[in-house]
Amino acid sequence: MKPFAELLERLLFAPGRNTKISLLRAYFSARPDPERGYALAAIAGALDFPGAKAAALKQLAMANVDAELFDLSYDFVGDLAETIALIWPAQGDDPPALPEVIERLRAAPRPAIPALIEGWLNRSDPSTRLALVKLLTGGLRVGASLRLAKLALAEMGGVEVHEIEEVWHGLAPPYEDLFAWLEGRAARPAAGAAPVFRPVMLAHPIEPEDMGRIDWREFRAEQKYDGIRVQIVAGPQGRRLYSRAAEDISAAFPEILEAAAFDAVLDGELLVMREGRIAPFGDLQQRLNRKSASPALRAGFPAGIMLYDLLFEAGEDLRPLPFDARRARLEAWFARARPARMQLSPLIPFASAEELAALREGAREAESEGLMLKRGDAPYLAGRPKGLWWKWKRAPLSLDAVLMYAQRGHGKRSSFYSDYTFGVWSEAGELVPVAKAYSGYSDEELNFIDRWIRNHTTNRFGPVREVEKTLVFELGFDGAQTSTRHKSGVALRFPRVLRLRLDKPASEADRLESVRRLIR
Amino acid sequence: MPPHPASWLKPTPSGLYCLPGDFYIDPLRQVPRAIITHGHSDHARPGHAQVLATPETLAIMRARMGERAGASLQPLPYGETLEVGGVRVRLVPAGHVLGSAQVVMEHQGARAVVSGDYKRQPDPTCPPFEPVRCDVFVTEATFGLPVFRHPEPEGEIAKLLQSHALFPGRTHVVGAYALGKAQRLIACLRRQGYDAPIYLHGAHANLCAVYERLGVGLGALRPATAAQKAELKGALVLAPPSAVGERWGRRLEDPVVAQASGWMRIRQRAKAAGVELPLIISDHADWDGLLATIRETQAPEIWVTHGAEEALIRACALMQIRARALSLIGYGDEDGEEA
Ligand SMILES: [Zn+2]
Ligand SMILES: [Zn+2]
């Protein structure tokens, strides 16, 4: 447990992505199976211990500590898990090994769990105790993300990260087959059989300086729909609906799974569609972030998909084909399969860049965010290869930012965390604040965000909570200006929250450079 | 019946005042007669007329303040006794920094001990704390909460050395207070086998020289300010905590920012300070150290000067020891000298 605790501690304090990746890489290279695999599972959130909850651990601690001293300490420290770990009176130097913790917890009957935990805490030093408490209570929010862990694994094995992504959903803790492959001791674990996620291809935003360089004749145009990007994987092994961040969202959209009676992997946009018409994003939000969907919800907010691309057809990998060829295959497949709840995203004919620009401005509010431009000869590649796909957003003055800090609001909202500080990525790969914003969301959304903040707080500074940097918001704003108030040196003018982007990973929030370009 | 110390030792806005001896201990304002427990700037302030302290503390005060250290400086080595107006005064090691002393006062058979700042962990740069039995023990409570338990410094130094080995190309900048912490860190690093030159911010060089003059060997030290960037690659640099976050620290290429302080025990404190490598090394007693010391003095009454008084007083109540807060304002917050 101790090396894992040390890793967590260093990750927490590591200032940048690269340092975190090298720490993770060093850990995965040095530690044996199955410990490193369980560590990876903990970071991935793939472990759950129903018998060990924060309240029960507090009880354990309180058995040996005066209540008043506990409260004074909790006031000072601000975090329950950390208070428990630090105030724990016994001190040992023989912490249990991580695999022992996981295997014994899995085997133990529930009433035996508190005594088990007490014994481990007695045997451990404070940083191991904190790692234990956080592991047990599912609060392993240490600035480690699964994405960084995968990047570290890719470095360690000398493979591309998307090669790991491709097999990830077929793997289970402690991932010994994954490590065997990365260390060249075995072949890559098979991805083909299970309905696994394939890394998606992403577009670059068009910046003004790109305009002159683009050879418009080589590109095909489509609407950029205002939903969430998804991948449907269906075949004899099963059916899945994945978000573009590889999250399995099948359970929330049973009607899509039902409609996926085919053997193919498709790329598309998930939307609420009523009789073929696309509803505003707010409607789709009613369906997001749920574990299931009631019949009423399904009837009120019926889900559908605009299909963009065909990656596999009956086991045949089409990704190496050029876009034009895949598009022909998609159209032919669609004509035959006629899947319910799905439509083909139409190609938009255009003769010139000017015509395209006019189309972009005319994109209808609710249905489209702008245009997508895809090179006709481009294969389907993982990640964001330069110059093959472009997104050309309609309104330039909006950006995706990551929630960094939250503070309670005033008046009616004084018991909610409703005042937010948002950040974008600096050149050094750090999030830097660029805006404070309130308002712009319904009470229901506020409830969700408030709960999220309480469950994802990593630090408290008086009334301010620092949160896990994973929640992305789309902010609207009127301009950007230089600022001494923010560390980033810039501030957005009249920022407001347009919507939550639960589908977006934080790593894909906007960059500081793009904000700087807007300064007038 | 000896007179209770409360009748002859009084908290005043200028600090703790001994009536029969007519002197203040660590006065907060300029006074005619002062006894100084140690050289930290919240305890040793400039401009008193007569100053009594250990020879080491006087040397440190002179190095820091020059002429303003006091009009007349009287050294009192550890263990020697001096009569000051019917009060027998003795200075006993406090283990906090070089020269730090507890002030032991006896008046008509009653004994009070003012401990200043102290710690119970070993420190190669100064003699260890000696508990003295007394009727009133005056203690600090900087880390007076049960969440503060300082680990063995060896382990923390090992963390620094491990990081140094893991990132051999990166300069490790360690934020450490200029008096005491910096020299203790250097001495501990030497004991654990680090014998390369250690680079110092200007603020540290002066006090390291004082320590060396007083017989504390610190090995090869170099000014960081004069060093070439290339020379600092992979080196250990010590700087005041305030300089680490500033331009001075950022001047270095991709440094690992460490900080040695008892506050590093609390993660949010460490993170808020922008620290990548927190080292829990403190020159103050931790919770267990405070309680053990209170027990060893066998004092029936405890006065708490500064820090987390509330919790320490609660703990005394649980041990059935009378305790009160002196609520002296001005210790522990002077230019971040503490911890
Ligand atoms: Zn001090
Ligand atoms: Zn002090």
Image (tube, helix red, strand yellow):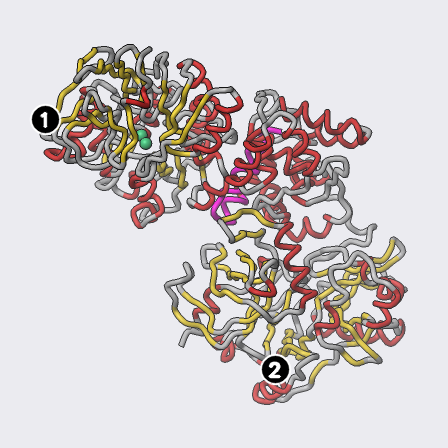
Q: Residue B275 at what x, y percent from top left?
A: 43, 42
The picture places residue B283, in percent across and down from the top left corner, at: 36, 27
The chain carrying label 2 is A
Q: Main secondary structure of the magenta part?
A: helix
Q: Is residue A184 visible?
A: yes
Does the closest atom of ligand 1 sit within 8 Å of the Cβ of label 2? Answer: no
Whether A19 is among the magenta residues is: yes
Using the numbered discs, state the Cα–Cα distance from disc 2 to disc 1 in whole angstroms: 90 Å
Residue B160 against residue A366 in the figure, above or below: above
Q: Quadrant of ligand 1?
A: top left
Report the residue marked by disc 1: B72
**Residue at 32% across, 44% down:** B242
Q: Secondary structure under badge 2?
A: helix
The residue that mark 2 highlights is: A217
Task: Give, as a single range, the part of the protein colored magenta.
Answer: A1-21
Marker disc for residue B247: none
- Label pair 2/1, CB-CB below 8 angstroms: no
Could you tell me residue B236's position as x and y percent?
A: 34, 34
Of the pair A336 and A165, the residue shown nearer to us:
A165
The amino acid at mark 1 is Ser
Residue A230 left/right relative to B337? right
Choose top left, top right, bottom left or bottom right for residue B62: top left
Left or right: A517, with A238 as reference point:
left
Image quadrant occupied by the N terminus of chain B? top left
